[in-house]
Amino acid sequence: MKKALLVVSFGTSYPETRIKNIESCEKAMQAVCPDRDFFRAWTSHIIRKKVANRDQMFIDCPQKALERLIEEGYRDVVIQSLHILNGDEFEKITTEVMVYKDQFDRMTIGKPLLSSIEDYQAVIDALIDNSPKLPADERIVFMGHGASHHAFAAYACIDHLFMTKNLPFIMGAVESYPEIDTVLVRLQQENVRKVHLIPFMIVAGDHATNDMASDEEDSWKSQIEAIGIETQCYLQGLGENEQIRALFAQHLLNAIGEH
């Protein structure tokens, strides 16, 4: 029986961060199931079109990838997304790919990064292990994407866990709670002198480059500096973290083992 591994991500138009984050995650997935042929899909039509026109790099959407697998005779496919939350993007993928389920002998989907309390603990451990020791008046502020889906509560949950563990970490989100205004209030209340800004995203792409680290007036860097706090930015996605990649790989193995 022909077996396939399909890794699905949002995609990125930044070649360097694609290699460091998406492709490094894909290689981690391939390493734990070497008996499966590897395929890639990106969900963002805009990014797929951009890299096709600019780089002549043609990447399937999830539906096209599955149609390709059917045409090539694959009967067993496991899909692993590189999404952080069980949010609208992941639900959209699940809904779209399940249309093809009856055309395979077996099709299963691995869970996103934060899917259980054990996942939260593992992610926090990964952040701790890859963060510098800070003086009492410094904080690491993580910028998450945010979501209109109720899964946005995951950001508040991990921020609460930061506080209960007395970590010098603060979680914020671009498009939902905890928003930057909430982060700014906390920084002032805690008399923070310096902030280290780090993306809480698989890739350090547009949001990290523009919304977080740019010199634009409304960037997080500019807003934090405007209240008198020194700010240092790190354009490094979660996909560069070996422990994060290992957690995705474990979700993939769990999905394979479910049947």
Image: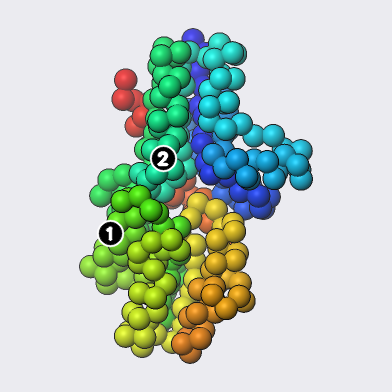
Position of residue 66 measured from the top left corner of the image (x, y, whole percent) = 53, 23
- Residue 139 visible in the shown view: yes
Q: Which residue is mark 2?
A: 90
- Residue 249 visible in the shown view: no
Which residue shows up at 55% across the image and 67% down it? 211
- In the rendered structure, which amino acid carries the disc numbered 2? Phe
Position of residue 98 measured from the top left corner of the image (x, y, whole percent) = 41, 24
Give the vertical position of 153 relative to 71 (above or below): below
Of callouts 2 and 1, the N-terminal one: 2
Q: Which residue is mark 1?
A: 157
Give the vertical position of 23 relative to 124 (above or below): above
Give the vertical position of 52 relative to 63 (above or below): below
Position of residue 187 measured from the top left corner of the image (x, y, whole percent) = 37, 81
Give the vertical position of 218 relative to 201 (above or below): below
Query: Of circles 2 and 1, which is in front?
Result: 2
Q: Nearer the viewer, residue 224 or 117?
A: 224
Asked which secondary structure carries label 1, the reply is helix
Q: Nearer the viewer, residue 95 or 1?
A: 95
Quarter of the image for residue 162 reads: bottom left
